Structure formats: structure tokens, C-alpha cells
Image (cartoon, helix red, strand yellow):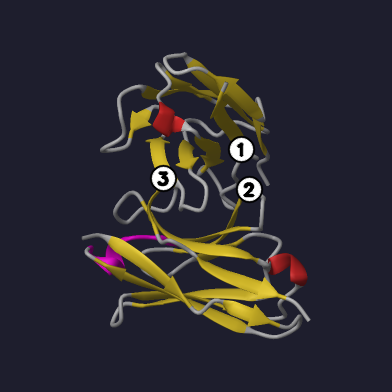
Amino acid sequence: DIQMTQSPSSLSASVGDRVTIACRASQSISSFLNWYQQKLGKAPKLLIHKASNLQSGVPSRFSGSGSGTDFILTISSLQPEDAATYYCQQSYSTPFTFGPGTKVDFK
Amino acid sequence: QVQMVESGGGVVQPGRSLRLSCAASGFIFSSYTLHWVRQAPGKGLEWVALITYDGGNKYYADSVKGRFTVSRDSSKNTFYVQMNSLRTEDTAVYFCARGLEVAATFCGLDVWGRGTTVTVSS
């Protein structure tokens, strides 16, 4: 099975900050990497699919990059409503493993 | 609108069975691969299983293989997971979700239900 790791596990930032979250796969997954945002008590929301494709309706301050084993989610200007936990997930092969998550909150 | 609604959760004793349902609407049900994803209390997301758009293939996480079975009924636009031999570690919120791309398996999950809670306890 492909293992996914994320760093950091949590971060605190200020409104307007640029935030980056890293995700690494235990083997190459090409661009089959998705990012989700989950707010407390809610279902996850797809932000980015296939590493860099912005899902419809998602603000343009979110972007994704990477291929192979290393990927980045960037929030260009953090907004109050971005407080959440962010997960990466590989859809290259089953089981479609998720990373452990990165919790983003405000200083 | 496009939505998925889970039902069937509850409290069950270890070793017993439970079937969850996911009712889909607003899209062509038979065109999409469907997934179950779970989240134990205070923990991260765990992918559980999928069934392809045509029902021809099913895949499972190692943690549920041999105990859980997914199925779909296009006449009812409903997706199921039959959970047998339940363990305390199966306690979680169970979400159903749709694959993003038509007639594809290896893609992200774009439509999610709100989840249904399963508690396995004696």
C-alpha cells in the first residue's frame, strides 16, 4: 500500500499569510494527488484534484503543485474561513490512502 | 441538486452486522464510481472501499477486507456497505462519496454525504 505523509501536522498563521502544506507519497503516484479541506463536524471538500487542478467553485487563493512523490498545497492569502484540517489523498492505486492531515488555525 | 445522503448508522455490539445505505440524487448514478470513507472520533480520514461505476469491480482497505461488502442498486440510486463481524475499531462516522470523473476510478472524490455514525460497543 502507498503511505502518505504530511507536514507540518499543524500550523498557526495570520490573516493574509501565505501558507504551504507538504504531502509525500511512499512511491511515485504521478499526478494522482487530491487535496481536501475539512471543517469541524463537516464532510471533506475537494479543493484540488490531479495535483494542480482547482475544483470548480474553490477560491483561486488555493493552488497545488508537484508530481511523483512530493506535492504542495498553497494558500496564497489565508482567510478566516480557511481554518480547517487539510488532507492529501492518492488516487493512483487502491487503497486510496489519505495523509494524516494538517490543522490550520490562527495566531 | 447533486447530493448523497447516508443512513443506517447506530449502536451495535462487537461481532454483529450493520448495513449502511447512501441515497444519491441529481446525477446519473450509473456513471460514477462510489466510495465509503470513515473517520474515527478525533482521527483522520480512512478510505474504506469503492465500487466502480458499472459495479464490475470492488476494492477494499485491508482493515475491512473479508468483513465489508459494497454494492449498488441503480434502480434505487442507492449504494450500500454491508458490515459484518464488526469490531470496536470500526467505530466512526461513515461518509459516502462520488468519484469526480464519469466512468473513471482513479480520481478525487467531489460529492460527499454528511455522514452516518456507527458505534461498536458492548
* Chain letter of the residue carrying label 3: A
* Gap in angstroms between the C-alphas marked 2 and 1: 7 Å
The residue where tag 1 is placed is A101
| Quadrant hosting residue A89 | top right
| Quadrant hosting residue A63 | top left
Q: Position of residue B81 (x, y in %)?
A: 53, 75
Residue flagged by tag 1: what amino acid is it?
Gly
Write down the region rendered in magenta: B27-34
* Gap in angstroms between the C-alphas marked 1 and 3: 13 Å
Residue reaching furthest to the bottom? B16
Rendered residue at 68%/47% (across/down): A1
Label drawn at residue A45: 3
Q: Is residue A57 above or below residue A22?
A: below
Is there CB contact under 8 Å for labels 1 and 3? no
Classify mark 3: helix, strand or loop: strand
Is residue B29 within the magenta segment?
yes
* Chain letter of the residue carrying label 2: B
**Is there one chain holding both mark 2 and mark 3?**
no
Rendered residue at 59%/22% (across/down): A12
Q: Mark 2, residues whose alpha carbon is within 10 Å: few (<14), some, or many (≥20)? A: some
The answer to whether one can see residue B83 in this image is no
Residue reaching furthest to the right? B122
Asked if residue B112 lies left or right of residue A13, the reply is: left
Q: Position of residue B119 (x, y in %)?
A: 66, 73
Is there CB contact under 8 Å for labels 2 and 1? yes
Residue flagged by tag 3: what amino acid is it?
Lys
Earlier-in-chain disc, 1 versus 3: 3
Residue closer to the observer: A94 or A82: A82
Q: Position of residue B20 (x, y in %)?
A: 51, 77
Residue closer to the observer: A102 or A64: A102
